[in-house]
């Protein structure tokens, strides 16, 4: 798992890029996600899909039962990442699970569905990127990974 650059916050398109300088590897896909969650500062067993996978024997989600090789200190106490919902995800959840659920079939399962990607593109490309995203990319470009990216 490439953790050289990590995304913090509302994703997938509006995350804050953070330099992580980590590479993770494992035969156990549940364990690697659990360690990635711990690195970010989350309790892996508090994440429903990791707990469910562990309960069903698909892998290990308890960091205490996962052997770390290499720079174990890099896992540490976590890096204080936060989860957030972007405006687009928030709107989607209003339709799928919230008060707009009665309109779900009309908005998401009819020819009108084309409005959703259009609205997402308008928000991300015309509103969010010029007001927020451009500054985040500029800040990331000043990091060693950002400078390397610019060479490609």
Image (tube, rainbow, N blue to C red):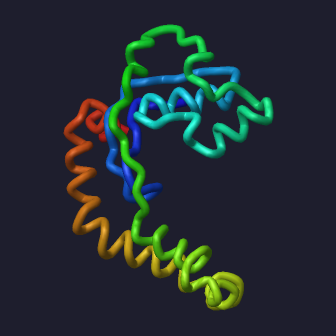
> Horizontal placement of 113 versus 85: left or right?
right
- Does residue 105 lie above or below 20 as drawn? below
Count of picture labels: 0
- 21 in relation to 133, above or below: above
Quarter holding the C terminus is: top left
Q: Nearer the viewer, residue 115 or 56?
A: 56
Up-down relation of residue 143 to residue 70 (above or below) = below
- Residue 115: x and y in percent read 54, 85
Give the residue at the far top of this rendering.
Answer: 70
Residue under the image location 67 percent in, 30 percent down? 29
Query: Residue most toward the right?
Result: 56
| 113 and 51: which is toward the camera | 51
Q: Quadrant of residue 32?
A: top right
Q: x, y percentage for residue 68?
A: 54, 12
User: Residue 125 occupies which quadrant of the picture?
Assistant: bottom left
Residue at 63% over, 29% down:
61
- State left or right for residue 50 relative to residue 118: right
User: Looking at the image, which residue is at 60% across and 25% down?
Assistant: 62
- In the image, what residue occupies the spot 46% across and 70% down? 90
**Position in image of residue 54 (x %, y %):** 71, 32
């Amino acid at each position: 798992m490439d953790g050289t650059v990590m995304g913090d916050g509302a994703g997938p398109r509006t995350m804050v890029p953070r330099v992580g300088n980590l590479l993770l590897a494992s035969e156990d896909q549940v364990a690697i996600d659990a360690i990635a969650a711990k690195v970010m500062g989350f309790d892996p067993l508090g994440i429903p899909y990791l707990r469910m996978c562990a309960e069903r024997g698909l892998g290990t989600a308890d960091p205490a039962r996962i052997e770390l090789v290499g720079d174990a200190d890099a896992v540490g106490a976590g890096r204080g990442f936060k989860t957030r919902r972007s405006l687009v995800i928030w709107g989607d959840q209003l339709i799928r699970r919230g008060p707009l659920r009665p309109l779900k079939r009309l908005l998401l399962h009819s020819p009108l569905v084309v409005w959703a990607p259009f609205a997402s593109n308008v928000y991300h490309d015309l509103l969010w990127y010029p007001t927020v995203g451009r500054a985040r990319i500029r800040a990331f470009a000043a990091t060693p990974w950002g400078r390397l990216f610019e060479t490609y």
